[in-house]
Image: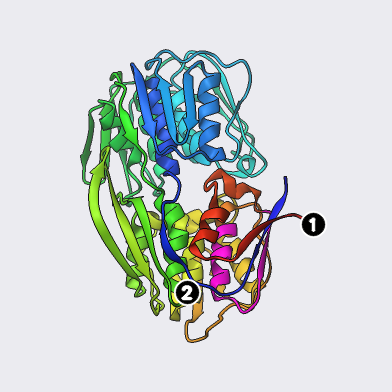
């Protein structure tokens, strides 16, 4: 059902909360658990629409999956060769991660698959994945524009390749490595810049020998995956909204519990600290091979920066809310090298430029980023108004956080997709102090 957010202007964020489990790790826990020998037990699983789409796809491929029940999931693995032909199309919903990783995983099967998605996913580029897989011997068909639906045909066998990525993308890297499990010989990927390494870490947790030397990561095909026990950390991409909110709203003091602190994902913390944010890392620890910690964030006077290029791929999903932080900072913020934002659930550069303009904050979008002249000296940099989220969950949540520094309420249209990545966002945000309500779209 169509819904909007109505968010009161002003406020502060206080208390302690735990955001839902990491979406990237939740997707991979189902995928690798399905390919493993034995039963994988998962706790902290994200019960959002995207991760549930992955669960449903693997059920359709003949894998028994119990749950989620309060974040607990049991995946009864069928082994590397145990997936069964699906009875119909495999619906990935809005989950781009699921579709791209499935392309790698399914191209080594002996049966045909058809991957479909919702309207948003059906506009997203898949050729960046299908092209390196084709070099491995995969047979993959997309539309003429390189978008879904994606048809995967049985191949005569995959062979390992040396793949030098031109664009830093964890999804492309992961798809190639997953295909490499089914390939003859060594499959290696060299990254132009570091990207999230959840796939490599989790493969190792399932007993696969994964090697890394500098920017190059590789594995041998044909290895056996063994069931594992996984505790999914809280998603730092979801925590990012509250990190920014507590930073920009005067009087805020908020602790976020059990947040995943994988060094390939902490760009948002590094960028906010460069801007002057007061973020304290408490009780750092390792859970299931992934580093986690509690994060205490207090309001601070942010300053504009030129975002270091090496941090951009480490915070690519967090830029919508980082643009909000920049608008509330003193001075100019410049982001470059973020062209990947153009091909997310929406064109997030254009969408955020339009959203900020709608609340009275003009910014300068560029081909690969944004230039923002911050209004940190003003109590309310935003005037309030009506924002079009374009059905993009991160645009919707970023602009809800912007209301903390708005003179008047902010109404955000088309917010139903927030459930894909952050179920319970309105409830948690309201508990922390955001004046947010969900309304049926007029």
Q: How many marks?
A: 2
Q: Which residue is mark 1?
A: 442
* Dot 1 alpha-carbon crowd within 10 angstroms: few under 14, some 14 to 19, many 20 or more: few
In the image, 351 versus 248, the foreground residue is 248
x and y, in percent, of residue 297 in the image: 36, 66
From the viewer's perspective, is residue 37 above or below residue 340? above
* Residue 120 in magenta stretch: no
Q: Which residue is mark 2?
A: 249
* Residue 397 in magenta stretch: yes
From the viewer's perspective, is residue 256 above or below residue 245? above
Whether residue 126 is visible to the viewer of this picture, yes or no, is no
SS for dot 1: loop
x and y, in percent, of residue 288 in the image: 27, 37
In the image, 380 versus 437, the foreground residue is 437
From the viewer's perspective, is residue 221 above or below residue 337? above
SS for dot 2: loop
**Outermost residue toward the left in this view:** 213
Whether residue 35 is visible to the viewer of this picture, yes or no, is yes
Residue span colored magenta: 396-414
Q: How is the image coloured?
A: rainbow
Label annotation for residue 88: none
In the image, 268 versus 81, the foreground residue is 268
Residue at x 56%, y 81% (from the top left corner): 380
x and y, in percent, of residue 341 in the image: 51, 56
| Badge 2 or badge 1: first in the primary sequence | 2
The quarter of the image holding the C terminus is: bottom right
**Outermost residue toward the bottom in this view:** 377
């Amino acid at each position: 059902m169509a819904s909007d957010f109505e968010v009161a202007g002003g406020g502060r964020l206080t208390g302690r909360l735990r955001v839902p489990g990491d979406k990237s790790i939740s997707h991979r826990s189902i995928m690798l658990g399905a390919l493993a020998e034995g039963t994988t037990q998962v706790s902290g699983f994200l019960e959002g629409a995207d991760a549930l789409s992955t669960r449903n796809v693997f059920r359709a491929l003949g894998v028994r999956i119990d749950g989620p029940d309060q974040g607990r999931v049991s995946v009864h693995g069928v082994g590397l060769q145990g997936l069964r032909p699906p009875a119909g199309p495999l619906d990935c919903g809005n989950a781009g991660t699921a579709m791209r990783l499935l392309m790698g995983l399914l191209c080594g099967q002996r049966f045909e698959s058809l991957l479909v998605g919702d309207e948003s996913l059906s506009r997203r580029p898949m050729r960046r994945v299908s092209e390196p897989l084709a070099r491995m011997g995969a047979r993959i068909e997309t539309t003429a524009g390189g978008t879904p639906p994606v048809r995967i045909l049985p191949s005569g066998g995959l062979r390992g390749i040396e793949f030098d990525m031109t664009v830093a993308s964890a999804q492309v890297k992961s798809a190639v490595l997953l295909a490499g499990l089914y390939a003859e010989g060594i499959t290696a990927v060299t990254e132009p810049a570091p990207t999230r390494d959840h796939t490599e870490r989790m493969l190792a947790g399932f007993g696969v020998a994964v090697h890394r030397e500098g920017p190059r990561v590789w594995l041998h095909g044909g290895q056996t995956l063994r069931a594992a026990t996984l505790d999914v950390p809280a998603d730092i991409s979801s925590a990012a909204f509250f990190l920014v909110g507590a930073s920009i709203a005067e009087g805020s003091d908020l602790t976020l519990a059990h947040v995943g602190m994988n060094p390939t994902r902490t760009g948002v913390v590094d960028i906010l600290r460069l801007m002057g944010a007061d973020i304290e890392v408490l009780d750092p620890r390792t859970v299931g091979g992934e580093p986690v910690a509690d994060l205490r964030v207090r309001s601070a006077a942010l300053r504009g920066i030129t975002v270091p290029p090496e941090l951009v791929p480490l915070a690519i999903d967090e830029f919508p809310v980082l643009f909000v932080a920049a608008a509330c900072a003193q001075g100019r913020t410049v982001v470059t090298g973020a062209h990947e934002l153009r091909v997310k659930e929406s064109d997030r550069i254009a969408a955020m430029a339009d959203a900020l303009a709608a609340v009275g904050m003009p910014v300068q979008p560029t081909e690969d980023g944004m230039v923002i002249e911050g209004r940190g000296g003003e109590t309310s940099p935003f005037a309030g108004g009506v924002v079009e989220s374009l059905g993009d969950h991160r645009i919707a949540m970023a602009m809800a956080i912007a209301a903390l520094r708005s003179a008047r309420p902010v109404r955000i249209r088309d917010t139903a997709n927030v459930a894909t990545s952050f179920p319970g966002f309105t409830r948690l945000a309201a508990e922390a102090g955001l004046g947010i309500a969900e309304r049926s779209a007029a």
